[in-house]
Image (spheres, rainbow, N blue to C red):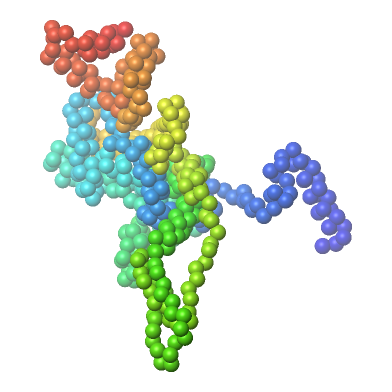
Amino acid sequence: MTKKGGELAQLRDEVTQLRIKAFEAAKQTRRTEGWWATSSGPNSDLKAAWWWLVKRHQSLVDDEPLASRAVSVIVQNWIGDGIMSKPLGATKKYERTFKNWAESTDCDFYGISDWYGLQSIIARTTAVRGACVVRKRIHAPLIDKGLVPLQLQALEPDWLDFNKDNGTDILFGQQFDSDGRLMGYWLRDSHPGETVMSNGVRITSTFVPKEEIILHFDCRRPGQRMGIPFGTAAILTLRDMGTIREAMQMREKIAACFAAFVVDSEPAEAGSTTGIDFDSLEPGAVEHLPPGKDIRFASPPGAGDFVATHKEYARAVAVAYDVTYESLTGDLSNVNYSSFRGGWLEFARRVLYLQGKVTTPQLLNPVCRWHDDLARMTGALRGNVSWIHTPPRREMIDPTKEIPMMIEAIQGGLMSLSEAQRMLGRDPEEVFAEYQQDLQMWEGMQVSAFGSLKQAATA
């Protein structure tokens, strides 16, 4: 570079620094030294890092208690005992047809779970591995059972053939047209991690149209085509926690190994084999040292307050997973009703997001459409229907306070009875039908609970 060129480059750097002087984080200072940040797209960096993130997060969920607990907390609140779907404008017969299908293991390609169990498996796979693939399968023998011939095959995202990626129209095993619209998916014939790989058998892939596949994941950037594990931001913290905990456990084991050593101060005679050499300690051991030998132990520095350190790490893990510290650890020692409820409500917003913005549009609605299409083909449905999805109830923190608030909201017109029932995870029509039956059964009897409910309903 010439002298003039170097001066121009320096001048450009100075001008740039002047333009960003109002933003401390954009300056090149001692505090930002060594900070490498990229401006890549939503898929380029993820493509290179995805396999490592998934493998390491899966390992942590399998082995680390906090990672396993975090995923369980998310799935149990996200899905619980299942999100109930109901067709609106359909006949009672079609409602029963869908209910029978959803409550049967025949809806599962593998015949293990019912529809609500599949929801839990799909949600857990999404949380652990970043995404879950659901494939539409048609199984004609179900018609003889009075069911719609639809089966769902839940697959880990590993089934997508990433080897097909060419950097242009195929990404993460997904085929796109020239305008960037999704056309379909390249699915492997078997899971690449199964033992068949070790036998030298080559796994091939098949193109499946997008109409037969669901890719369920939490999309965080426009154009993102694959999800990341929910605990990605906590992977290194969880590993450090495990290492520290193992070191503390080893320290406690060594401290518990109280042993006695017999030292012979007399010099050893020629050819004597008195004493033994050893490399480990056992509790209560009495060891004879060879004459002239002594044993000394290192005095490592103190490890500080392990409990406080562990709690701080656990809070960081809870933040990374978007769950509350109390739900993650079960530690309720420093909370009261107000603080616990505040954290619980914030977590509830995260759960509502997963239910309403991820699972409903990506999983529930497509599956219901598949069911409707096959029902029309078999004559079980005529015309079009819409669907409503009711998530599982969330347990109240203090029913003695929350139930009166709910009743006041109904009486004040701020909430309908149907909305209140759905908040409790119930189907309003089923509840009101049961209530009507109870009223007829106990007609003429003075039952205060019925009277209060009737008053709330007519207020």
Q: Determine the residue located farthest toward the front in the rendered image.
A: 266
Q: Residue at x 86, y 55 (%)?
A: 7
Q: Indicate the position of residue 342 as horizontal and vertical percent values.
A: 46, 28
Residue at 81% across, 54% down: 9
Q: Is residue 268 left or right of residue 372?
A: right
Q: Position of residue 212 (x, y in %)?
A: 33, 45
Classify residue 90 as left or right of residue 403.
left
Instruction: Decide: is 237 above or below 333.
Output: below
Q: Quadrant of residue 251?
A: bottom left
| Residue 287 percent location from the top left of the image | 38, 74
Q: Quadrant of the C terminus?
A: top left
- Of all residues, the one furthest to the bottom in this rendering is 270
Location of residue 140 by image quarter = top left
**Who's the residue at 17% across and 28% down the image?**
93
Question: Viewer-proximal residue, 417 or 255?
Answer: 255
Q: Would residue 38 be found to the left or right of residue 218 on screen?
A: right
Instruction: Please state the horizontal and vertical placement of residue 317, each as a whole percent of the image.
Output: 47, 45
The image quadrant that residue 17 belongs to is top right
On screen, residue 3 versus residue 187, left or right, reads right
- Count the labels in the image: 0
Q: Quadrant of the N terminus?
A: bottom right
Q: Is residue 385 visible?
A: no
Residue lying at 27% horizontally and 34% vertically, measured from the top left: 372
Residue 251 seen anywhere in this rendered image of the structure: yes
225 and 384: which one is in front? Answer: 225
Depth check, front residue: 59 or 181: 59
